[in-house]
Amino acid sequence: MKVLQTRVKTVAKIASLTLTALLIVGCSSSGTLKDGSATDGSGSSATTTGASTGSSITSVNSGNVGDLQSVFYFEFDQSVIRSEALNDLSLHAQFLAENGGAAVRLEGHADEQGSREYNIALGERRAQSIEQFFVGRGVNGSQIDTISYGEEKPDISGLASKSRRVEIKYTAK
Amino acid sequence: MVNCNMKKICLLLITLLSCSVNAQLLVEITEGVDEPTHIAVVPFGWDGDQAMQEDISAIVANDLRRSGMFKLMAEENMLGSPETESQIFFRDWRISGNDFMLIGSMKPTATGITATVELFDILSEKKIWSQTIDSAGSDLRDIAHYIADEVFQKITGIRGAFATKVVYVTVQGRGDARKFRLQLADSDGARAKTILSSNEPILSPTWSRDGKKIAYVSFETTRPAIYIQHLATGKRQKVQSFKGINGAPAWDPTGNQLALVLSKDGNPEIYILNLQSGSLERLTRHYGIDTEPTWAPDGKSILFTSDRGGRPQIYRIDLASRALTRLTFKGKYNSRGRLTQDGRFLTMVHQDSTGYHIAVQDLQSGRLDILTNSKDDESPTIAPNGVVVMYATKIGGKGVLAGVSLDGKIKFTMPSSLGEVREPAWSPFLN
């Protein structure tokens, strides 16, 4: 039984990776000067959030899950999860997988460049990217709710690099 | 008058205001045609005791001016103010460089006012149009826009679009304190009123072809849903709220169907919703993003944005055969297409090395022209006469509306004193 479960998880993981790969194919970088400018570097947002190496939590529970990083940033026109996000995302996934009563809402966002409805779609891709990551780590799909705001709720800083994000919000712990 | 007849469930989140007065947008022409037609709009005579509520001749003059095609004679340079043909000395008006002149007189009646207007070709000294219009007196701006439409058509041969309306979204405040409002105004920005306000985003407003209804996306329930609102009554209905995206509504020419985007099956796809039967038909099947549908004016095909080729481009799908054609090839980002009523010209958001601009493509020749040089342009909407495309842009980091003629010669901005302005949608002809 245990073995079977692990295998199921592995299959789900592979499926998740495949999906992520498809998503990468679906959105190549634009490569314009503006989009690749210094303010967009992965370093800036990571430094600001202080989470480039992830949190130091090793055992996650309902008491400390709120201390995990909850906002995850993305590159221009991309929905691929950045490597520095993996540590805390894995801990969120572990908590959700171990606590079937817990639930999250994944809110996807885009920066203000390009058309609004297309950005709604981009924000959803980002939220789905994290949803797939969670499902790939054994989280039940019914624990996850996704929504995209597109460019309608840019980060208050006004920085494009901070607006391209997914916010994880717990609706039950 | 908008009647506040709405569903109880919306009471907490939504306020439908019957007739609130809002700060208005003003049209400022920044570039006009090289050889504008010179016209004198002589202040209309008024044979009443009390002052008029609206200066009709000034509104007519302003309409013609903001079209960018006319040069209006300054009132202070006028040598007289004729109200009838017999009072006109054509030689004087000819010497001052005018091609046309409009005169008029108004007087009170038992039920309102009556206005008589006459348009003259100054060179030939011929009257080319005249009309007597009766009014209840409460619709003076409508009468002014009507007169401007007639003058515009008589002189340019193009149907005027001054008596049309625009809806747009305003955003005030920052962060969680933001307030979104769906506004309805005359095409010159006057008589703005709020038809929906919410603490959550409102986007993608779009007119039914009969000009009686607006469909839009509202996040008022904290999830996106598509609503249809009847302008005359304020009554509205939620038409779609699946899990995931419910977005980008677009009316078909009959008003019986709505194209929309749903991601309920995993990723954004175009669907057609029959508003009478409620049946839903899926139109696209692709793992890429398919969004921003718009109907061709003949109702036979739908244009949409898709990144199925790697980057967003505009495609056409024929509804009968389901044959798919890619329409845009220049540049790596073309989105949110809108067609002129003759189906020939496609306006879009086009990205080049300097940013996102409004561009127009002639679907007959394939030629693409970039119409704007600002870098944050989006949401193009075409006037029903096909002369001008209005769009949202940023000036000094703030969202404003602007416009450009399809030949690129006329440009205007619509500065606002209130917050961000975005998502314009130009009405069809309303008369």
Image (spheres, rainbow, N blue to C red):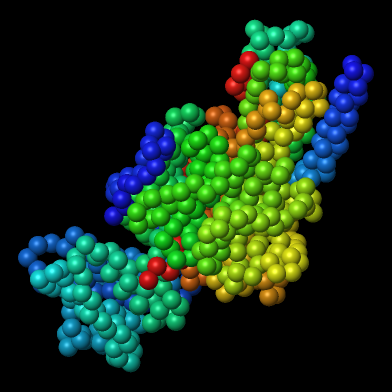
Query: Is A131 placed above or below B45 here?
Result: above
Residue B131 located left or right of residue B295? left
Left or right: B36 with respect to B94? Answer: right
In the rendered image, which quarter is residue A22 located in? top right
How many labels, in total? 0
Camera-side residue: B17 or B8? B8
Is B297 left, or right, of A6 in this rendering? Answer: left
Image location (x, y in percent) of residue B162: 38, 67
Place of residue A75 in the rendered image (x, y in percent of width and height, measured from the top left): 73, 35
Q: Residue at x 28, y 64 (%)?
A: B141
Q: Nearest the camera: B199 or B282?
A: B282
Residue B236 in sight from this viewpoint = yes
Residue B337: x and y, percent?
62, 60
- B230 vs A171: above or below: below
Q: Residue B22: image x %, image y %?
A: 32, 46
Quadrant where the C terminus of chain B is found in the figure: bottom left
Question: Where is residue B134, by image quadrant?
Answer: bottom left
Q: Residue at x 51, y 64 (%)?
A: B255
On the picture, is A128 further left or further right than B85?
Answer: right
- Spot the residue most to the left: B49
Residue A42 to residue A79: above or below? above
Q: Note whether residue B415 is visible.
A: no
